[in-house]
Amino acid sequence: MLKIDTHAHVLPESWPDLATKYGDQRFAVIHQHEGHHRIYKDGKFFREIWPKTWDPQLRIAEYAAFGVQVQVLSTVPVLFSYWAKAHQALELHQHLNQHQAEVCRQFPRNYAALGTVPLQSPRLAIQEMERCVDQLGLQGVQIGSHVGDWNLDAPELFEFFQAAQDLDAAILIHPWDMMGGESMPKYWLPWLVGMPAEQSRAACSLIFGGVLERLPKLRICLAHGGGAFPLTIGRIEHGFHMRPDLVAVDNPRNPREYLSRLFFDSCVHDPQALRYLIEVVGADRVVLGTDYPFPLGEQKPGSGIDALALDQPVRCNLFHRNALRWLALPATRFALGDG
Ligand code: CO
């Protein structure tokens, strides 16, 4: 069966050192030393990466071992650089987008891709998104769960979402710059506690801000199963009913109605949580997503869905049909038919 992993990060083996070029240590840089590839940010070690982060053939072999044929590539959020001057971030983003396009050109049956854009300037972000889709042949863009002080309902960002809808571009929302990070220095809590909250912040902002209401054809997928959002939809809905004076100020529709408008990846690490997700958002809204190649990802791609022993039509939905609808791609683009 065709299996498409919608949440798979990629980086080039190296990228321009903007920290040195612009004298700003906040830019993530890559240092190669004695065979190690290490990312530094703010002058500190951030993460080591390995050949499977950049080598497309090695990746294909590795995920093929789990019966996955396609990855939808996206960059690593530490490179969003939304805090930077927009033209500097754009310089970095164009390098990353060019790399993704090259991988897709080389292996069109094994990769699709979502570019990255400097959302701190919606105007430049729209231009780069158009370049990604129209010139580079990418399927859309990955964006962060917020942009500096803007949540995704910020009026400044609306024209970007409108452009994505007009362009028929898919959007993946990925947590980053986790809320409360400063107050949670230990135990990897920004990843374990902050990330699920970031996804709920993004979903609630798009819903309550009326973005999804005003752009009914926008195709958005929330990584990490939408984080806390689907699991707390009852609370969110209750708040909407009990305090409309606080919640329903910009959009009068029940937030639950938008569950069937979004896509959610399957990367929740718990069969009961995945079963609940499928039940509450619908089997036509969940897509395989693994967070490859990182340690918090699903280490055996597809194993979470396999563990549920679902009927074949539902498995087809989760493994590829929903992803193809989100990406607006025909199954014939990839190695197998719509089996
Ligand atoms: Co990820």
Image (cartoon, rainbow, N blue to C red):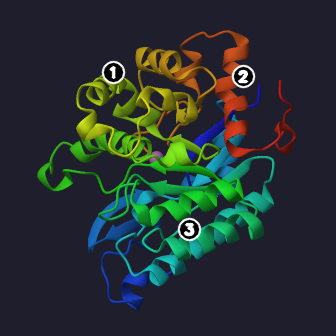
Q: Which mark is residue 47?
A: none
Q: Earlier in the sequence, mark 2 or mark 3?
A: 3
Residue denoted by label 3: 13
The spot of residue 176 in percent (x, y) is: 36, 54
Residue at x 78% of width, y 44% of height: 329
| SS under mark 3 | loop
Marks 2 and 3 sit apart, C-alpha to C-alpha, by 34 Å
Q: Amino acid at mark 3?
A: Glu
- For disc 2, the marked residue is 316
**Whole-percent x, y for residue 292 in the image:** 52, 44
- Residue at position x 54%, y 64% from top? 159
The residue at which mark 1 appears reads as: 234
- Please state, as top left, top right, bottom left or bottom right, where the C terminus lies in the image: top right
Q: Quadrant of residue 221?
A: top right
Residue 313 vs residue 249, the one in the foreground: 249
Q: Are marks 2 and 3 in contact (CB under 8 Å)?
A: no
Q: Earlier in the sequence, mark 1 or mark 3?
A: 3
Label count reads 3
Task: Identify the residue at horizontal 15%, vertical 47% (top origin).
Answer: 186
Farthest left residue in view? 183
- x, y (%) of residue 133? 71, 63
- Between marks 2 and 3 in the image, the one whose residue lies nearer the viewer: 2
